[in-house]
Image: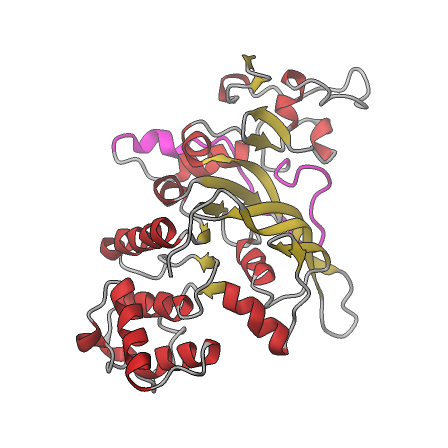
Amino acid sequence: MTRNTHDDVVLEAQNLSKHFPLRGIGAKGAVHAVDDLNLALRSGQVLALVGESGSGKSTVARLLARLYTQTSGTVLLRGEPVTAKRGKAFRAYSRRAQMIFQDPFASLNPVHTVRYVLTRAVRIHDPRLKGPELEDALSALLTRVQLTPERFVDKFPHELSGGQRQRVVIARALAAHPEVLLADEPISMLDVSIRVGILNLLKDLRDRLGIAILYITHDIASARYFADTTYVMYAGRIVESGDSESVTQMPAHPYTQLLVRSAPDPENLARTARTGANGEPPNMVTPPAGCRFHPRCPFATELCKTTPKLLTIAPGREVACWGYAAAVPGALDGVPEGVAVPDLGSAAAPVEVSGVPR
């Protein structure tokens, strides 16, 4: 199904939060998995959500897929609030927003053939299809994900490679003719040699069908290759966002800099080891006050124990770091005089406010 690729918002999260109450005898508190998240998925564009394990990325995908119910905030589909949880309302929503899970080995029932998997997906969303029309639909789905129908339609999952299984999973998602694909680390379980093929397939679907894609990954290098926009997430909060080229080549937040420098560089292994940060991710039951990265940040001051706003440092770029407050008009309003502002020094990204470099 071909769509016009407009730069319009399809799926949006506004101030989205998810806290998981602790369970057990005498347990109190909650895991703050996601806090105050805002993002928008647009037709024909890929938004990458990047962060280390435990940062809340997969929780975001499940919130947008309505597999979890948010603690607070709103999910909007084409500007309308989404409240579906189950039944017909959930089925109608899932027809428009489909999820691709991380593990293609667990996503397919081992006792069912590809024909059964895709037929069930097609019939759920279009029960009238039968006979030759159904066969044509199955062939079209497999062809779209670059699998030969005659060769693969009657195979079982154990007869497929990891990349072929993931292509079948993508075909199953496309059976609903979705407007949004929520891809939760779709290549992390695959061999390195076939990861690019899956990303190229998703890029082709984005370009030909105008589908909005949320691409969740811990690999910031693949975000640069694949995504139009990149959001960086740490301990349940967005710390930086912008176009993928800028975020990956000129990272602004100290945590983004840590991610970029942690990527192995065969030509300079000594440099990749010097990140400047230490410690471990925080306990999300009692997350640190203020910037949640400040216990690990080499530039932190007392001001960092106060939650920073997302500051616009260039057109389309935002960063939640007090280190840029002095360069952004109004960012220090309300901050007492004499309070030390973090000095990022040469680690700071260029700031351009109202078209004027600073």
Q: Residue furthest left?
A: 151
User: Is 62 placed above or below 215 here?
Assistant: below
Q: How far across and how far down the image is residue 320, in percent?
A: 63, 33
Quadrant location, the C terminus: top right
Q: Residue at 31% across / 52% down in the picture? A: 204
Q: How far across and how far down the image is residue 57, in percent?
A: 54, 53
Query: Of 265 and 328, which appears nearest the observer?
Result: 328
Q: Taking 186 as reference, is 78 left or right?
A: right
Q: How many marks?
A: 0
Q: How far across and how far down the image is residue 131, in percent?
A: 31, 86
User: Is 240 placed above or below 118 here?
Assistant: above
Q: Taking 221 as reference, is 40 left or right?
A: right
User: Is 81 placed above or below 338 here?
Assistant: below
Quadrant location, the N terminus: bottom left
Query: Of 16 and 115, which appears nearest the observer?
Result: 115
Q: Residue at 46% across / 63% down in the picture? A: 178
Query: Of 168 and 8, which appears nearest the observer?
Result: 8
Main SS of the magenta part reads: loop
User: Is 68 placed above or below 330 here?
Assistant: below
Q: Residue at 43% across / 64% down in the picture? A: 100
Q: Quadrant of residue 245?
A: top left
Query: Of 197 and 43, which appears nearest the observer?
Result: 43
Q: Quadrant of residue 160?
A: bottom left
Residue 299 belongs to the span the image colors magenta: no
Residue 280 visible, this angle:
no
Q: How far across and how far down the image is residue 119, in percent?
A: 36, 81
Q: What is the span of residues highlighted in magenta in the rendered image?
A: 267-294
Q: Taking 335 as reference, is 298 left or right?
A: left
Q: Quadrant of residue 194?
A: bottom left
Residue 279 belongs to the span the image colors magenta: yes
